[in-house]
Amino acid sequence: MTTNDLNSYPLSGWFPGHMLKAGRQMQEALKLIDLLVELVDARAPRSTRNPELLQKLGSKPALLVANKADLAAPAISRRWEDWFSARGERVFFLDSRKIANVRGLVQLWKKIVLEERSARGATRPLMRPVRIMILGIPNIGKSTLVNRLHEKKKALVGPKPGVTRQNQWIPLADGVELLDTPGVLWPRIENKCHELLLTLLGNIKDEIVGAQLVAQYLCLKLQEMGMQNALNNLIEPEICNSDPEQFLNAFAERRKFLLPGGVPDQERAAIAMIKEFRDGKLGRISFEAPPE
Ligand SMILES: Nc1nc2c(ncn2[C@@H]2O[C@H](COP(=O)(O)OP(=O)(O)OP(=O)(O)O)[C@@H](O)[C@H]2O)c(=O)[nH]1
Ligand SMILES: [Mg+2]
């Protein structure tokens, strides 16, 4: 069995209309900003990206921020950095939990916008504030970053009646202003494996896709990447190479997740396995590497 076999399962048909509406709001907001910041997941920068965003941007400068870099394999993140910069795309690998890392990001925003203004011939590029908008698919870390950015300035935010949401700016250090509402993007789901990966990474709710399928995907994907050793923490190494159902059964037995009659509770095992992964117990794992 391979991950490709999972592609025969139907897609859940998730990604509802409100995200399309958010897309229209984004178009409006684009006119107001100097730099667009798209958050993606450092473990899968391609699959967590909105493929249409670049086309909508026009000449607006953009920065890709690969968030949750603390969960990704550092060597693969370095390869992504090289890959993006070879294509003339700016990328910044971020661990939003580290304030120094977040401050470095703000300095980069400023640098990009000032360079761009100077290149357009602005004589005083510092005159206007540097206006930024953060975008990304659900659960990618938008709110975490926004909160991190104005930790000491919370009093300045919060809804103000009569002010349109698009026009509220959060002043950060050094003349940088952040649009207060991050935009929600949606990925274009290519196949079942893509949907399963997004669920594993937390961008789609587990209930929509089903934990057992997600856990099976994780097993198979680790095996395909030659990383089945990551599962050694959960179960004996020889079982890490086995069929995902066998793996879930053995894991259920080990954890004593048993249904009446002693039948292994695969659902509970799947949920526990996904939790171990999300808690970082399987180590730092990148699911996508740049093309060679
Ligand atoms: N390990 C790690 N976790 C992060 C990082 N950034 C965010 N998270 C976690 O990711 C989860 C989602 O973060 P949010 O900030 O709520 O994501 P969001 O994009 O605002 O989500 P929506 O509002 O649902 O669209 C939370 O559990 C965060 O703690 C990071 O850099 N590293
Ligand atoms: Mg949020």
Image (tube, rainbow, N blue to C red):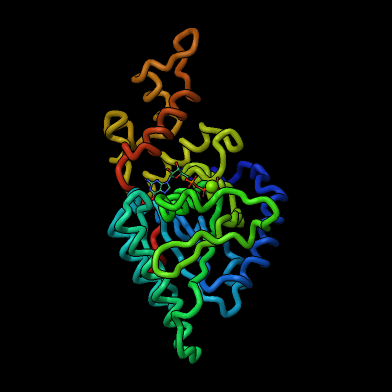
Q: Is residue 220 visible?
A: yes
Looking at the picture, how far across and down is residue 85, in whole percent?
A: 38, 74
Kindly identify the residue that appears in the image at 54 percent across and 63 percent down.
133
Q: Nearer the viewer, residue 131 or 174?
A: 174
Q: Classify residue 291 as left or right of residue 212.
A: left
The tally of labels here is 0
* Residue name at image x 56 percent, y 47 percent: 195
| Residue 277 position in % (x across, y down) | 38, 38
Q: Residue at x 51, y 56 (%)?
A: 47
* Viewer-closest of 92 and 245: 92
48 left or right, relative to 291: right
Residue 258 figure quarter: top left
Q: Where does the image place residue 275, in percent across and percent down from the top left?
A: 41, 33
Residue at x-position 60% and y-position 78%: 58
Q: Is residue 214 left or right of residue 253?
A: right
Using the image, determine if residue 105 lies above or below residue 268. below
Specify the quadrant of the image occupied by residue 41.
bottom left
Q: Is residue 5 visible?
A: no
Residue 79 pos. (x, y %): 33, 65
State whether residue 30 is above or below residue 197. below
